[in-house]
Each structure stands twice: as structure tokens, then as C-alpha cells.
Image (cartoon, rainbow, N blue to C red):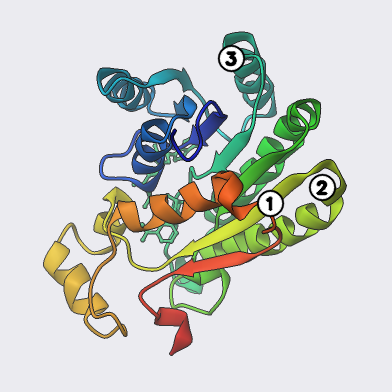
Amino acid sequence: MGRVQGKIAIVTGAASDPGLGRTTAMTLAREGAKLVVTDVDAKGAEDCAQKIRDAGGEAIALHQDVTSEEVWQQVIAKTIETYGRLDILVNNAGIAVLKLLDDLSLDDWNRQINVNLTSVFLGCKYAVPEMRKAGGGSIVNLSSVAGLIGLKSCIAYSASKGGVRLMTKSLALELGQDQIRCNSVHPGVIWTNMQSGARQGSKEVGQAMAAGLPLGRLGEPEDIANCILYLASDESNYVTGAEFTVDAGMTAM
Ligand code: NAD
């Protein structure tokens, strides 16, 4: 039996390769979940779903801009139409607008908050009624170390991720009575397309930066997917409103 055998899961932002959403979707599928993988990159999402099916799992891909309320309603409806219930929501899709204050426009700010924070509110809003019908569920929201500590060039990004952190705790209080758990994950420096974009595409630059961390190395998407797997599974059934740093000790310094 897999660790999330028979559970129905939505993972947003699952197209990127390497990316946290894709690896999370593949990990949940390997452990027995049936997947709905979504992304603005429809081709990448379909590729992720196909890889899951090729490995013997079950998955459908949907085109989704997580900032659209209407599309969220459609994604939840399609999930129920396909699998009949919803147990797990991983709010993973995100962007990193990394600019200093003088360069950060109001458009930049609004885009960052919409994609990283408003999207999580919308996902929870439309997933929760279905989780209530299922008798409970697990929501995992991707925050960041930038949601815990200040980092240069992260004004809007930190605001979005700090918002995700505290929204997660408020939701946990409200949804506990429905046996819906809600936790946040705070990755450090994990080598994905987003991280590559922030390091001029050079893994060496990323590695040099990570050398100063207690574990002294970059993280891989599996490091985050394994934490999300635990939070999605019944192994964590007494865990809600918690924040999980997976950061090689960065925030312990
Ligand atoms: P990534 O850029 O590799 O992948 C993000 C995915 O989200 C992409 O497939 C992209 O197409 C999708 N996406 C972007 N905007 C979208 C939208 N409006 N609607 C739907 N999909 C959209 O990033 P990643 O490194 O895999 O990050 C995943 C999550 O983890 C993000 O929320 C990110 O902020 C967070 N995070 C990552 C790191 C890291 O080091 N990689 C660290 C801390 C937090």
C-alpha cells in the first residue's frame, strides 16, 4: 500500500522541470494518489500527467491560471467529475519577482501578490467544500524561507509568502472542526527552474551560495516532495497549522 493510496490530489504549478510541483505530483502518484496536475503551461502539465501514467499511475492535466476564480471553480468541478472526491490540495504554483524597492512597480507588486497569495486563498476557498463532503482533507501551501525572514530583493515575494504562512494558520483554526488540516512548507535553496532563474542559470552560483548553509549544499525537489508527502498522508493526521522549514538549516542561523 502506498502512503497516500487512493487519495485524490490537486497539485498546481506542476509543469516546471525541474520543479517542486512536478516532483511532488510524481511522488504522490508513486505513493498511490490519483492526480490532477495544473499549470499555466498546459503542455508541461500534460507532460507531467503523461509521465505519471507511463509509470503506472493515474493523472489528468488541466490548464489553469491560479489567479482566476472562475478557473479554480472549473478545476475543482473537473476533479470531482473525474474522481468523485478531493482529499489533498498542494498550492505550489508561484513566481518570484525579485526587485529592489526603487525598481518594484505597482504592477510587479500586484502580480506577485495575485500569483502567490490570492491564488492560495482561491484554491482553499473552492477546495474546502469538497473536502468537507469527503470528511476531511489536507491542504499544503508552499511558502518559503522568505516567509519567515527578511531577504534582499524579496519585498513583494516575502509579503506574499509571509501572507501564505499566516493564512495557513488561520485556516487551520477554522477548518480543524472539519478534520481539514492546513500546513505550510518553507523551502530554502532548492534547485528548480525558479532557483536557476534567480542564479543566472548557473548551478555553480547556487552551490556557492548554499555552501554557507549548515548542510552546505543545494536542495533537490525530492527534499520538498518528501515533506509534502508526509503532510498529505495520514501519517501527519495530528499536524495542522504548522510550518515546516526544509532549508538546510538556513533559518536556524
Ligand atoms: P518553478 O518556477 O520551477 O515552477 C513554478 C510553476 O508554477 C511553473 O510550472 C509555472 O508555470 C507555474 N506558474 C506560474 N504562475 C502560474 C499561474 N499564474 N498559474 C498557474 N501556474 C503558474 O518554481 P519552483 O521552484 O518549483 O517553486 C514552486 C513553489 O515553491 C513556488 O511557490 C515557490 O515560490 C516556492 N519556493 C521555491 C523555492 C526554491 O528554492 N525552488 C524556495 C522557496 C519557495
Q: Label 3 amino acid?
A: Tyr
In x, y percent, where is residue 15?
Answer: 35, 33
Tag 2 secondary structure = helix
In the rendered image, which quarter is residue 52 located in?
top left
Tag 3 secondary structure = helix
In the rendered image, which quarter is residue 207 located in?
bottom left
With respect to residue 163, does 101 lie above or below?
Answer: below
**Residue at left offset 57%, top offset 34%:** 66
Q: Label 2 amino acid?
A: Leu
Inter-mark Cα distance, 1 to 3: 22 Å
With respect to residue 136, does 146 lie above or below?
Answer: below
Question: Could you say which disc has been placed on residue 223 in the image?
Answer: none
Question: Could you say which disc has been placed on residue 182 in the image?
Answer: 1
Q: Earlier in the sequence, mark 1 or mark 3?
A: 3
In the rendered image, which quarter is residue 246 located in?
bottom left
| Disc 3 packing (10 Å; few <14; some 14–19; many ≥20) | some
With respect to residue 158, does 31 lie above or below?
Answer: above
**Residue at left offset 31%, top offset 85%:** 214
Dot 2 corresponds to which residue?
Answer: 175
**Residue at left offset 35%, top offset 75%:** 248
In x, y percent, where is residue 103?
Answer: 45, 66
